[in-house]
Image (cartoon, rainbow, N blue to C red):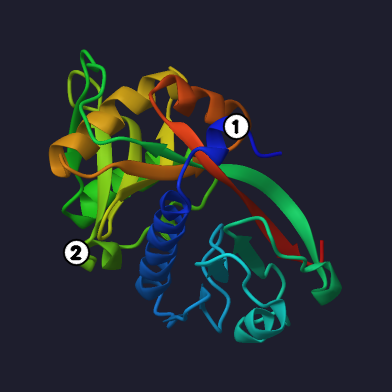
Amino acid sequence: MTTPQQKQQPLPLALSAARNNAEWCAAMSRSHGLKSEFGDQAWAAPARTPLYYPDAVTLAPGAAPDALVPRIDTASPGASVKDSFADLDLAGSGFGVLFEAQWIHRPAGPAAPAPGLAWEVAKTPEALRAWALAWDGGDGHAALFGPELLDEPDHFVISVRSSDGARVVAGAVASRSADVVGLSNVFTGEDGPESAWPAVLGAAHALFPGLPVVGYEAGDDLAVALRHGFEPVGPLRVWLHGL
């Protein structure tokens, strides 16, 4: 359901968020040796993308399913489409809705202080590995973030460390595009999501002081983001083939 707050937001905010997210998905695909392509209506990868990443992201409302679905590999299990404006019907192509979420936006500006925490951008394979292990939390998928990501000039892996610098206690990926910076993969440890946002937002502001911040969240994570200055700017939906 669209809220009055969403109706007041110009569509370009959702357009910018969708494009930014697609650029991050393209970078992740490149880091795994996969090619992809941007079109007027959608970004898509013809071979299955890395775990947790969609095979296509729509870039404008009204994308045509008949043109989009043939651009991805639905023969392999797990194909998914990020329907950035929640306006597609992919049921006839064998997809079901995996989850729904909201694009979010925060104006450029400083964040609340994060006492006792310091952040850094991972610049070495060792630092990236430490971040990935903390992000993964023992699930066995840390290798998803390989050292090839360090060659991506517009994507920054942010590690938030404990006061003694010994542990990565929170983090995110900041992706810079023309008019926004996107935050994804926001995580925190035992202190919960409330502790992650001040440090991550502080890092984003220090790196890109003039850019507003976008991303997407759902459920309790959306509620936390709203408490830290974000507002919802439009719905999105993720479709999974075979669901």
Q: Is residue 142 left or right of residue 53?
A: left
Q: Is residue 171 above or below residue 11?
A: above
* Position in image of residue 167 (x %, y %): 28, 29
* Label placed on residue 4: 1
Q: Residue at x 70, y 77 (%)?
A: 65
Q: Is residue 187 left or right of residue 122?
A: right
Q: Nearer the viewer, residue 29 or 41?
A: 41
Q: Residues within 10 Å of mark 2 (few under 14, many from 20)?
A: few
Q: Secondary structure at mark 1?
A: helix
Q: Quadrant of the N terminus?
A: top right
Q: Quadrant of the C terminus?
A: bottom right
The residue under label 2 is: 153
* Position in image of residue 106 (x %, y %): 36, 35
* Position in image of residue 134 (x %, y %): 39, 38
Q: Secondary structure at mark 2?
A: loop
Q: Nearer the viewer, mark 2 or mark 1?
A: 1
Q: Residue at x 22, y 16 (%)?
A: 113
